[in-house]
Amino acid sequence: MISPLRRRSLTALCLGVAPLADAATSSSETNVTESEQTLAPMVVTASLAPQTADQSLASVTILDEADLRRQDPKDITDILRAQPGVDVSSSGGFGKNTGIYLRGTGRESTPLMIDGIRLRSATDGGPAWQFLEPRVFERIEVVRGPRGSLYGADAVGGVVQLFTPKGEGDPTPSISLGGGSFGTRRASASLSGAEDGTRYFVATSRLESDGYEIVDGEGDKGYDNTTGLVRLSHGFDNGAEVGVLALRASGNTEFDNYGSPGDTDYVQQVAGVYGELPLTEAWSSRLTLSEARDESNSHRDTGDSVFDTRTRTARWENILAFGPHELVAGGEYARDDVDSTTAFDKDSRDNKAVFTQALMDFSPLSLQASLRHDDNEAFGEETTGSLALGVALDETHTLRASYGTAFRAPTFNDLYYPDDGFYEGNPDLEAETSETYELGIRGQLGRGFWDLAVYQSDIDDMITTVDTDGDGSVDTSENVDRARIRGVEVATGADINDWTLRAAVTLMDPEDRDTGKQLTNRASQSLRLDADRTLGDWSLGGSFIAQNHRYEDADNDERLAGFGLLNLRAGWAFAPGWSARLTLENALDRDYETAGGYNSPGRAAYLSLSFGG
């Protein structure tokens, strides 16, 4: 058997015991009186081992199944926008290029994990957030702060992990149909359950939209997405477990690249198999073999282009318990392969890594220390580490302080892109490196919580595109820039009677230290308010999101105005197992841009009808 602490944590996670988080389960589902103390939510991404939010000694945001159902987003980034430390930049809605900027770091500096499997483009560096269907996920964890010592390359600003349902109880079917503005049609269905130690979840979804005019005068740009998910696991009497996961999203999106229209056929896919075995009372071992694919085939008047990348990974993790303490240790091997119409100088590379982490509990003190060494075929060796100290001031307040390092790996484009007359990769690039200091405090009071964090990140050898000839063209990439990012994040919320309330404020100063200018595509101030109320069979709610201006260029001459968005929602459980949901997005019909020259959607209404689930 595994350690009592880990066993309790795993049981809590499997049963969904996360009644209060930065966005938590609705009060109607917990049946807890206001006088009772609500437990802190569970989180696994912060330290690889399940812990409560205060035990993790990290700044975390958890969005659970109730949040996803209430807000019913069409895009996974809709629910992430303006969460603490999170900024989103997009060249339009409905499947258009989207980047996540976590704590002011670059769009390539936030790894996306799906049930422990990383998804990204090896050529571009960032994941295709816009192609992920929210209805096949039941939980999102956002961990802010460097996690390079656990996840390797690119975990500079933090990590986002999406979790799919495991399945439990009797066979439960669900189906949802809906549609709305911009000629949008949406349908999804799933089947989940568990029997004799076997858990299963199978789901499919389809979204089609005629889109809207993302660039003035260029016509509507449509989008379609078909997603399928299979998750299956079996637990044995001795505590061992094996499982498989397969997730595939494919479709077509139309785009306009500064007057050059076209469309892209895309595939986003993750697949994996794992086995977990309790070797002794205090030692649990897990092996995961996985593959992730990012594929795109773009068509335009100037010709077709193909960028297909594949990452195969073998990861071995071990957790050993020593009384209240735990040690996590393991190794990882990953190989990237590129198949493209562009003739890269190299089309593959591998990365070998070993890592370890100590989780020590000297109540009321706790200490976490981690170390990882990566050996990459393309850019050499990098060692990252972190140290965190926590103090339980009393039963409800935890003070934390941490230091961590991370690095961003050069992409295939950065290193090997062939000279096309406009740009050429630089094989001599080194990885960006960073140091981050953080101080935070979390309070869990009755059915409310609050969390405050202040931090500073110093980034050296930033990879940037430069004009080597001075003729105005972008010629190559170099390690030239330094950045300093300072920030304050405040998150709070409460479940009061039939109300679910959340608020988040982010204040940030992302500065290019060489020029003194603000880093591009980042808002320095953001606010998010979420309020929902249950009224018998009805639920009403809304979200208000406000962000200040951002800059499109390094000289800070091209300024995009700030904006405020109001989204409204209503739900009605009108019969046993049946419900209807209406959402009104951008209710005030604000015009705004998060990427220069690309319009964001105006006012839009959507209605859905659901059964089961």
Image (cartoon, helix red, strand yellow):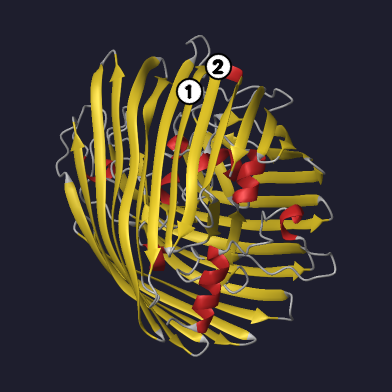
Say which residue appears at 42% left-offset and 75% top-offset: 370
* Residue 235 sits in quarter: bottom left
Q: At x 19% / y 52%, what residue is drawn?
A: 349
> Which residue is more in the foreground, 537 or 60?
537
> Percent from the top left, x then y, of residue 211?
51, 19
Please identify the quarter of the rendering in which residue 522 is found. top right
Place of residue 40 in the rendered image (x, y in percent of width and height, measured from the top left): 66, 68
Residue 157 in sight in this render: no
> Who's the residue at 38% across and 59% down the image?
233
Residue 279 in view: yes
Does the CB distance between marks 1 and 2 fall below 8 Å?
Answer: yes
Query: SS at mark 2?
Result: helix
Counting from the top left corner in percent of width and height, residue 567 is at 71, 33
Vertical placement of 58 versus 222: above or below? Answer: below
Q: Counting other residues with Cα less than 10 Å from the Cα at mark 1, is it few (<14), some (14-19), or many (20 or more)?
A: many
Name the residue type under label 1: Glu
Find residue 248 and report its horizontal and vertical position in percent: 36, 40
